[in-house]
């Protein structure tokens, strides 16, 4: 396994973890990002492709 493959696998695992935290609804975005050690931009970018409910959730939190 090359370092690039390993990096992709870690990113994929991190997004699965983020998705589970998101679905649980117990942690804020800030807390999720701190636990998984990613930026907010990476969080939203990754979940945009994995969870379609994020867009709805984002609009609801802005109101």
Image (spheres, grey):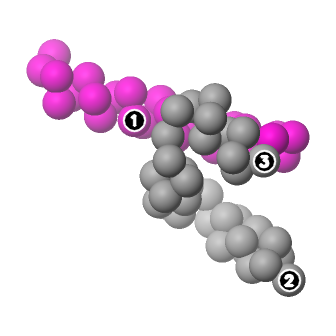
Residue 8, position as x, y percentages in the image: 29, 34
The residue under label 3 is: 28
Give the numbered dot on residue 45: none
Q: Is residue 39 above or below residue 13?
A: below
Out of 63 and 21, give the one closest to the viewer: 63
State whether residue 46 appears in this view. Answer: no
- Where is the C terminus found, in terms of image quarters? bottom right
Q: Residue at x 69, y 46 (%)?
A: 30
The residue under label 2 is: 63
Q: Is residue 36 above or below residue 28?
A: above
Residue 62, position as x, y percentages in the image: 79, 78
Q: Main secondary structure of the magenta part?
A: helix
The residue under label 1 is: 11
Mark 3 Cα shell of 10 Å, populated few (<14), some (14-19), many (≥20): few
Residue 56, position as x, y percentages in the image: 73, 74
Of the image marks 2 and 3, the number of the one nearer the N terminus: 3
Callout in the foreground (1, 3) = 3
Of the image marks 1 and 3, the number of the one nearer the N terminus: 1
């Amino acid at each position: 396994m090359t370092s690039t493959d390993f990096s992709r696998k870690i990113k994929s695992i991190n997004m699965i973890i983020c998705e589970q935290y998101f679905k649980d609804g117990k942690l804020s975005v800030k807390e999720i990002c701190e636990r998984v050690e990613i930026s907010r931009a990476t969080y939203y970018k990754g979940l945009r492709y994995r969870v379609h409910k994020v867009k709805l959730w984002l609009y609801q939190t802005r109101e």
